[in-house]
Amino acid sequence: MLRVYYCDHCPIPLPQGHKFPIAKYALLRQALAAENCFELVPAPPASAGDVERAHDPVYVEAFVNGTLSGAAIRRIGFPWSAELVRRTMCSVGATLAAARQALATGFGGSLAGGTHHAFYGEGSGFCVFNDAAVAIRNLGVRAAVVDLDVHQGDGTASIFSGDPDVLTVSLHGRHNFPFRKQTSGIDIEFEDGARDEEYLSRVGEVLPAVREFAPEVVFYQSGVDGLASDRLGRLSLTHSGLLERDRLVLGLCRDAQIPVVVTLGGGYADPIVDTVDAHANTFRTACGVLTNLQPLARLRRLQK
């Protein structure tokens, strides 16, 4: 069974009409619970010390204590609350636990995370702390972040700028948020309305570079906001296209024997079931593709 961490046991209060689809997390867990492939585990919270390995301690303290400025809170996009602090720490904790699980077994998953707009000293775009960055900094591993959310992983690119042990890869909409892009190790941009054939071709082009980088672990940001029905995505991808995308990325990890961490990223489809189905398909694909994937410790023994 594949171990997957969830954090919908930590709800956050949002005002009526808020555009963030908080309901998708519980719906996704319920969908996966009906299958026999997954061990679903409540996420342990990360500590402030864990987070500070990737973020400014002053920012971390201000968020935890509720003393961020109004402008900083608006940039994040959620009203501050003690519940938001708990949820944020559990979301980061889910990815950190999933990363440890991946290094031990070959796979770890989070039904949250993918908070790639968080920078070293500030949050943005519904992202408070950068979960992949926290995990990588805590574990001290050579890593590739394969970010296939429709929005550029600007915070991730910024945090790891100049770091030779982290490859950041982002395939995203040219005209979508964030409107001020950062420079990833590899950036691929799409025009509005891009369809499956072009998208999958470009995914296939970048994966050899990921393999050549020889990471000890891949963090797969598996956003599904490229769906044609997504309210914020501006691309025209289908469920079949996203399924093939997942097969390509996870197939690379299997073939190259690279442990992989899967996080969610964005998904804002109307109806919400489109988002839930697409996220669930990513994990179902992992269940089908990731056979005989070795943990990092096993790989290191084989290389000696």
Image (cartoon, grey):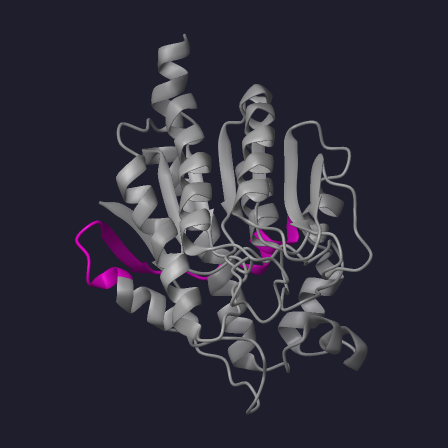
Q: Position of residue 120 (x, y in %)?
A: 73, 53
Please indicate, yes or no, whether residue 138 appears anywhere in the rendered image: no
Q: Is residue 84 left or right of residue 183?
A: left
Residue 33, quarter of the rendered image: bottom left
Q: Is residue 30 left or right of residue 25?
A: left
Residue 160 in the magenta stretch? The answer is: no
Name of the residue lying farthest toward the top: 304
The quadrant holding residue 300 is top left
Q: Is residue 252 above or below residue 280?
A: above
Q: Residue at x 77, y 73 (%)?
A: 72
Which one is nearer the viewer's eye here, 241 or 107?
A: 241
In the current view of this chain or complex, which residue is farthest to the bottom?
16
Which residues fall within the magenta stretch? Answer: 32-53
* 300 relative to 145 in the view: left or right: left
Q: Where is 31 relative to 162, above or below?
A: below
Where residue 183 sits, quadrant-wise, is: top right
Residue 87 shows in this picture: yes
Q: Position of residue 88 (x, y in %)?
A: 54, 67
Q: Is residue 51 magenta?
A: yes
